[in-house]
Amino acid sequence: MVVWSPTRGLIATWKPKGTMPKGVLRLSRLMEQIGQEFLKLARDDLQGCIKMIAMEAYSMAEKYGQHASGEVGAAIKLAVLSQFDPQDRRAYPVLVAPQQLKKFVAGNGNARKDMIPKEVLKRWSVDFDDPNLAEAYVLARIAHAVDVDPEGLTQFQRDVVLALDGRTEFDPSYTRRLVRVGR
């Protein structure tokens, strides 16, 4: 997870801590830790400043671990949803395909994952040792681009932003309904 602001730059980075258990306990710990990170943002008076959230969508070409990826993705989505009102679009991350993430930073959707930190350093002068945090940083930049369409985007970045239109589970027609059960 990376928190980035166009005015303040890189604010926070986070990765799961400790040895992660397996199965549902892993998902529970992940949700708990993400919730704790949101609490830190709230303490620093930053949670209200969150405008948009992006997360990497599932890689349909992944040969192994698709189910685990799906479970982790669902846990992340539920952790984010728990932080916002269900009618708030921020509760529904923009879903960015791995190729779109790579294209946004490198201009090429087939760039290797291990090259992402180098591309981030070249494009935005931010240095990451960890490719996962570098990808999270790119996702934060994509969230900003989707939210405000800033000046200075390259054509390939604009193409990614355009392709992401509607790539969220937010439904603006959603309204709360009271449901009566029984008589």
Image: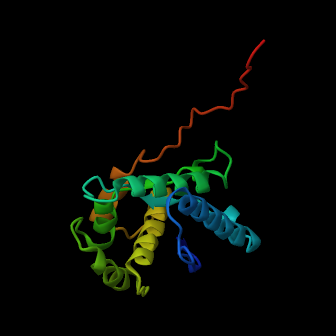
Residue 62, quarter of picture: bottom left
- Residue at position x 53%, y 43% in the image: 170
Q: Is residue 154 left or right of residue 13?
A: left
On the image, the x and y values in percent for residue 156 come to 27, 64
Q: Is residue 34 above or below residue 11?
A: above
Task: Depth check: give the residue in front, 87 or 162.
Answer: 87
Task: Depth check: give the residue in front, 46 or 64.
Answer: 64
Q: Is residue 9 above or below residue 81?
A: below
On the image, the x and y values in percent for residue 66 come to 34, 54
What colour scheme governs how the chains and residues are painted in the rendered image of this protein?
A: rainbow
- Residue at position x 60%, y 56% in the image: 79
- Residue at position x 48%, y 59% in the image: 54
**Residue found at the far right of this picture:** 183
On the image, the x and y values in percent for residue 123 come to 35, 80
Residue 5, quarter of picture: bottom right
Work out whether residue 149 can be spotted.
no
Q: Is residue 167 left or right of residue 24?
A: left
